[in-house]
Image: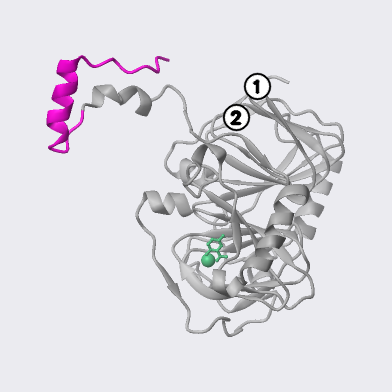
Amino acid sequence: MNDTAIAPSSERQAFYDRIGEHSLAPLWERLHTLVTRSPATPAQPAKWDYDDVVRPFLMQAGDLITAKEAERRVLILENPGLRGHTSITHSLFAGLQLIMPGEVAPAHRHTQSALRFIIEGHGAYTAVEGERTLMEPGDFVITPNWSWHDHGNDTDQPMVWLDGLDVPLVRLLDASFAEPANADSQTVTRPAGDSLARYGANMLPVDWQPSAKSSPVFSYPYTRSREALATLARNGDPDACHGYKLRYVNPASGGSAMPTIGAFMQLLPEAFGAAPYRSTDGTVFVVVEGKGETVIGDTTFRWKPRDIFIVPSWHWHRHRADSEAVLFSFSDRPVQEALALWREERGRA
Ligand code: GTQ
Ligand code: FE2
């Protein structure tokens, strides 16, 4: 790859200046940075240490501003290669949201899709379209695009979760719409657990036809995901790159839970050393259980529960688990697959 632009002679530069005044530019000065032989993301590998770094700052934010005033009290996990862009990968946003006891994050809706992956606290709720879901660590909860949602904490402990949204993707497409609700909290119209019973028991209501592209199940409890992984680990051999890995699905379609964001959970057995892997979907990982490390390129990131790390597009990486480990992850893979762009490559162990 040749990274250096052809040095323009002063005559060429004068020409560029003349055409620039007419909103014209020479493609030949830029083509090599656009149509690259392989992905050249500005996103960098990075890790956020939850217990020692992020959590103390998050609690300080709790003293600084209320959830109501902030609308959402979130610390953005901003990729060091994308500072100022509010992005963790080129297409995705991630942040850690804190709700203190007694607080409400007021109801609104928007065209951005959101996932919540619960980090700490027990029993605060997210309400989606009139149904409250109580949250526990390891639960995966979705807020499909254009669905009303508010969050509230009726417990006596702080509640923290990771937000994953397609904000940068929607910005790229200039397709953002949003509106606040009339009241801070939605009226509860269905009991907690209703959508899980209705759509999440490997059954669907007879004669029901999906009206949206997102999953009708709002909550994927950790107890169920964890049990599935434990059973897989007892019953067969791990994948060389992923260990035991499952993806969260929309039960009505078999596709991802939301059209723009794919989410996954994997179990790495004790002392497992994964083979190298890379794919075009830059991926955010959250450590749920266990200790280990992930080597991304030539940097080793040590991790423990609640740490968050990012593997940018097309970066070779390999996971190693000291003790049995569980990793949650999300990426824009469904978007890339729908557009026939997604690629992966496996290396030798
Ligand atoms: O909880 O509704 O991190 O609308 C960013 C935008 C969270 C939310 C974020 C949002 C939310
Ligand atoms: Fe929101």
Q: Quadrant of the N terminus?
A: top left
The image shows residue 102, relative to residue 199, as above or below, that is below
Q: Amino acid at mark 1?
A: Gly
Tell me if residue 158 comes above or below residue 327 in the rendering: below
Q: Is residue 316 visible?
A: yes
Q: Residue 347 magenta-drawn?
A: no
Residue span colored magenta:
1-25
- Residue shown at the point (60%, 84%) measured from the top left: 189
Measured as percent of width and height from the top left, residue 58 is found at: 68, 58
Residue that mark 1 sits on? 347
Query: Is there CB contact under 8 Å for labels 1 and 2?
Result: yes
Q: Position of residue 83 (x, y in %)?
A: 50, 43
Q: Secondary structure at mark 1?
A: loop
Question: Callout 1 environment at 10 Å: few (<14), some (14 to 19), or many (20+)?
Answer: some
Please, which colouring scheme is shown? Answer: one colour
Out of 54 and 224, give the one closest to the viewer.
Answer: 54
Query: What is the secondary structure assignment of the residue under circle 2?
Result: strand
Q: Which residue is mark 2?
A: 278
Q: Is mark 1 within 8 Å of ligand 1?
A: no
Which residue is painted at 16% across and 29% down in the image? 17
Q: Quadrant of residue 276?
A: top right
In the image, the residue with mark 2 has its CB under 8 Å from the nearest atom of ligand 1 = no
User: Eyeballing the image, is 125 above or below 345?
Assistant: below
Residue 109 badge: none
